[in-house]
Amino acid sequence: MTGLDRDAIASMIPHQGAMCLWDTVVAWDAASVTLRSAGHRAPDHPLRSDGQLRALHLCEYGAQAMAVHGGLRARQAGGRVRPGMLVALRGVQLHVARIDDLAGDLDCVAEVLVESDDSQQYAFRIRCDGVLLAEGRAAVMLGT
């Protein structure tokens, strides 16, 4: 399934309004999701400080990609989206200092590495115009 828009994405994550960071689901399957966003250039981006959007915030983009993927999988299985809590970031590498000055859209691929009934671990990679900006792993504990 592809082409899901911002409203569909917002229905699967706890963040709403400008804090919903992704604009569209480009593609997804049971193992991964690819998303795209142009919002990092917005002067009123909610994560900006001192007029800049730092690359550290790409971890939030990665976490939201995980949540979207979990929501897509739950809906496909006929279930409901389970809330999750980010509990760990590992192996995060930031290859730029900031992202508000990037002209292209952000693209993220998030892939399931390990999962159980109560937790998931994903790898994420975020690029702009094919250039790797950030990568890492994140673990989430799932609620009921």
Image (cartoon, rainbow, N blue to C red):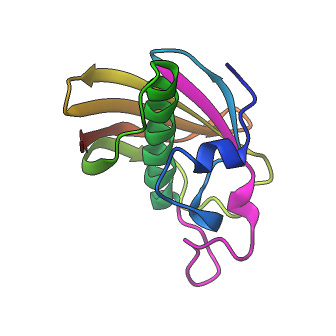
Q: Is residue 37 part of the magenta span, yes or no?
A: yes
The secondary structure that most of the magenta stretch takes on is: loop
Q: Position of residue 42 (x, y in %)?
A: 75, 68
Tell me where the magenta segment starts and ends, as one range: 32-54
Outermost residue toward the right in this view: 103
Residue 44 sits above or below residue 7 on the image: below
Residue 86 sits above or below residue 99 on the image: above
In the rendered image, the quadrant that contains the C terminus is top left
Please report the residue visible at 45 percent of the width from the left and 16 percent of the height from the top: 31
Outermost residue toward the top in this view: 30
Q: Position of residue 14 (x, y in %)?
A: 46, 56
Q: Position of residue 82 (x, y in %)?
A: 35, 40
Task: Please indicate whether residue 32 sits to the left or right of residue 7 in the image.
Answer: left
Which one is nearer the viewer's eye here, 32 or 16? 16
Q: Position of residue 8 (x, y in %)?
A: 66, 42
Q: Is residue 103 part of the magenta span, yes or no?
A: no
Residue 17 sits above or below residue 91 on the image: below
In the rendered image, the quadrant that contains the N terminus is top right
Please report the residue visible at 68 percent of the width from the left and 64 percent of the height from the top: 100
Task: Please indicate whether residue 13 sits to the left or right of residue 88 in the image.
Answer: right
Please report the residue visible at 75 percent of the width from the left and 52 percent of the height from the top: 38
Which one is nearer the viewer's eye here, 98 or 126? 126
Please report the residue visible at 65 percent of the width from the left and 71 percent of the height from the top: 45
Which one is nearer the viewer's eye here, 66 or 76? 76
